Image: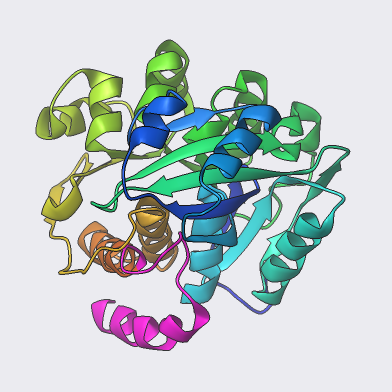
């Protein structure tokens, strides 16, 4: 986080993971391991290795990731002001994480664990849908005590991924402390099965402390039981800004004053992994610049569309110059 950067800063807290992107030609492997298509399922180290071995002959790529980590990385690449808290192993992958984030002028608050750095087996179907089997490893060791007294100094926004919601004590401490220090709190609901398993906790959390909620249509339905338009209305009553993403049809944004419909850009999808992370990055970046909600949504939609055109959840560095030119036009 640059000291000379006067843009309000976003602190992300999430699972620091390595993404192992794997292209699957058929979905029998998902059925074999009981993985619901399009979901994120937590697995142990043994099952993670079994899935890895079962897909070893498929095309794959490895990259640093984790939902909020991807968003924070993109905010920094956009020229925003960002920091990140996650837990990594004292291993090679942990070093890669730290160095990559610091190289991009992201202020890091990494905690170390005796466990190895976590990993995600992300399997991409022929239609670009992704199904994730996540071994959290060190990431699961993040505890309330890692939310230190001065952690939020210099930040205006806290962004948390729904994948952390299963750790109720951690997420409650982070959000309550952030709110007490005047930060705006944003959360992405992350996965429909996570929402279903933590519904009551999420309802209380969002109603009481959260300012901005990101959800796709499956997550919005899991949270409200309703289709996107009605779900948007329900979520917006619980927070300041509600966003429901509806795939190729774009997204809907609602605050107390307005409803904005934002079209998706024309894209040639290769892999949907990271689309939501890119959307959140663009939207939060727009908010830190003080842009209207429509503009925030347009930047979010553009970045999301560019992410789905590449394998993996992050845009390669070579893509960013052109992306930045287009984002400048959208401001």
- Vertical side of 291 occupied by 205: above or below: above
Q: Is residue 317 magenta?
A: yes
User: Colour scheme in the image?
Assistant: rainbow
Where is residue 97? Give x, y as percent: 71, 60
Q: Is residue 276 magenta?
A: no
Residue nearest the viewer, comparing 34 with 244? 34
Left or right: residue 252 compared with residue 204: left
Residue nearest the viewer, comparing 225 with 116? 116
Residue nearest the viewer, comparing 13 with 241? 13
* Res. 2 image quadrant: bottom right
Left or right: residue 235 compared with residue 285: left
Where is residue 13? Give x, y as percent: 62, 44
Say which residue appears at 70% left-offset and 46% top-offset: 86
* Res. 15 image quadrant: top right
Magenta-highlighted residues: 307-331
* Res. 176 image quadrant: top right
Q: Does residue 14 show up?
A: no
Q: Residue furthest front?
A: 57
Question: Could you tell me which quadrant the N terminus lies in?
Answer: bottom right
Residue nearest the viewer, comparing 211 with 323? 323
Left or right: residue 201 compared with residue 301: right
Where is residue 221? Give x, y as percent: 23, 25
Say which residue appears at 74% left-offset and 34% top-offset: 142
Majority secondary structure in the magenta region:
helix
Where is residue 316? Give x, y as percent: 48, 76
Tag count = 0
Question: Could you tell me which quadrant the C terminus lies in?
Answer: bottom left
Say which residue appears at 79% left-offset and 39% top-offset: 149
Q: Does residue 128 show up?
A: yes
Say which residue appears at 37% left-offset and 68% top-offset: 310
């Amino acid at each position: 986080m640059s000291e000379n950067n006067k843009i309000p800063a976003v602190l992300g807290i999430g699972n620091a993971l390595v993404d192992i992107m794997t292209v699957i030609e058929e979905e029998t492997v998902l059925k074999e391991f009981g993985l619901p298509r399009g979901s994120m399922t937590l697995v142990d180290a043994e099952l993670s290795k079994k899935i890895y071995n079962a897909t070893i002959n498929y095309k794959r790529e490895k990259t640093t990731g984790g939902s909020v980590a991807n968003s924070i990385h993109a905010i920094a690449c956009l020229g925003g002001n960002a920091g990140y808290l996650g837990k990594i192993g004292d291993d090679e992958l942990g070093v890669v994480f730290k160095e990559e984030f610091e190289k991009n002028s992201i202020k890091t608050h990494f905690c170390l664990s005796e466990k190895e750095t976590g990993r995600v087996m992300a399997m991409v179907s022929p239609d670009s849908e992704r199904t994730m089997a996540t071994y959290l490893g060190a990431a699961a060791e993040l505890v309330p005590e890692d939310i230190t007294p001065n952690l939020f100094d210099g930040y205006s926004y806290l962004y948390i991924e729904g994948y952390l919601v299963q750790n109720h004590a951690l997420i409650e401490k982070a959000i309550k402390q952030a709110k007490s220090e005047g930060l705006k709190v944003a959360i992405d609901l992350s996965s429909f099965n996570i929402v279903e398993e933590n519904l009551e906790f999420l309802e209380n959390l969002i109603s009481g402390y959260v300012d901005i909620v990101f959800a796709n249509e499956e997550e919005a339905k899991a949270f409200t039981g309703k289709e996107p338009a009605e779900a948007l209305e329900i979520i917006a009553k619980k927070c300041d800004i509600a966003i429901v993403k509806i795939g190729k049809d774009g997204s809907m944004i609602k605050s107390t004053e307005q409803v904005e419909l934002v079209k998706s850009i024309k894209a040639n999808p290769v892999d949907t992994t990271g689309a939501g992370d890119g959307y959140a990055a663009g939207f939060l970046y727009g908010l830190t610049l003080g842009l209207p909600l429509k503009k925030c949504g347009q930047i979010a939609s553009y970045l999301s569309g560019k992410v789905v055109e590449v394998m993996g959840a992050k845009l390669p560095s070579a893509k960013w110059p052109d992306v930045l030119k287009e984002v400048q036009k959208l401001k």
